[in-house]
Amino acid sequence: MNKNLVAVATLLVLTAALLLSAPAARADDSLSLTLASPSQTGNRGTTLDFYGTITALSSNASTLYLNGDDVNLGSPFLTSDSDDSPFLLTGPLSMDPGDTYTGLLFTVYIDPSVVGDGDYTGSYSILGGADGSTYNTISNVAYFNIDAVPEPSSILLLAAGAAGLLGTLRRKVR
């Protein structure tokens, strides 16, 4: 029985030594992502550009491939380009540890049918990994905010109509 106990203890010590000497297992390396203006205001029927800075962490083990992005919008009144063109056409295809990129990441179109003022949120993620065919989330912005406001021309048109109505009522009173 003592031999079995010694064998088990030896096996445990060897296993612990192997686990401690192995390099730490990592999930995919990651990026730091910061939007320049995470809260924006726009008129109905306009497109908002979201610029940001992406930094590959210096602690990353190797090159990261940036294979796509994902924009999640919290409203049917907002749409984003479905072909990833701002990010894929202007952003880097890969980043070595310590690399930084600043530029256009995505755009959001505010539908003209938005009723009243709207305050909408969304999230943005960069997808990629250790090779050109990996689509893990390697960085994200928890949320961005869009405040949809009426077009100035609509407000002016409403004000002109109200002034005309007041003028007509004033004439009838006299």
Image (cartoon, rainbow, N blue to C red):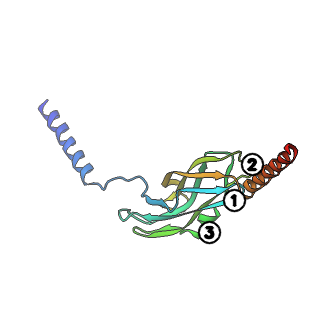
Q: Quadrant of the C terminus?
A: top right
Residue reaching furthest to the front: 174
**Residue 128: x percent and y percent?**
52, 58
**Residue at image point 24% right, 51% down:** 20
**Residue at image point 19% right, 44% down:** 13
Whichever of callouts 3 and 2 sits on the residue coming sooner in the sequence is 3
Calculate the distance from the C-alpha at mark 3 to the C-alpha at mark 1.
21 Å
Calculate the distance from the C-alpha at mark 3 to the C-alpha at mark 2.
30 Å
Q: Which residue is mark 1?
A: 46
Q: Mark 3–mark 2 contact, CB under 8 Å?
A: no
SS at circle 2: loop
Q: Is residue 83 above or below residue 100?
A: above
Residue 25 is left or right of residue 36, and the answer is left
Residue reaching furthest to the top: 1
Mark 1 crowdedness (10 Å alpha carbons): few <14, some 14-19, many ≥20: some
**Residue 16: x percent and y percent?**
23, 46
What's the amino acid at mark 1?
A: Thr
Residue 13 is left or right of residue 69, and the answer is left
Q: Which mark is residue 147?
A: none
Whichever of callouts 3 and 1 sits on the residue coming sooner in the sequence is 1
Calculate the distance from the C-alpha at mark 2 to the C-alpha at mark 1.
12 Å
What's the amino acid at mark 3?
A: Leu
Q: Nearer the viewer, mark 3 or mark 2?
A: 2
Q: Which residue is mark 2?
A: 113
Q: Which residue is mark 3?
A: 89
Q: Nearer the viewer, mark 3 or mark 1?
A: 1
Residue 130 is left or right of residue 166, and the answer is left
**Residue at image point 71% right, 47% down:** 114
SS at circle 1: loop
Mark 2 crowdedness (10 Å alpha carbons): few <14, some 14-19, many ≥20: few
Q: Mark 2–mark 1 contact, CB under 8 Å?
A: no
Pick the front one: 91 or 171: 171
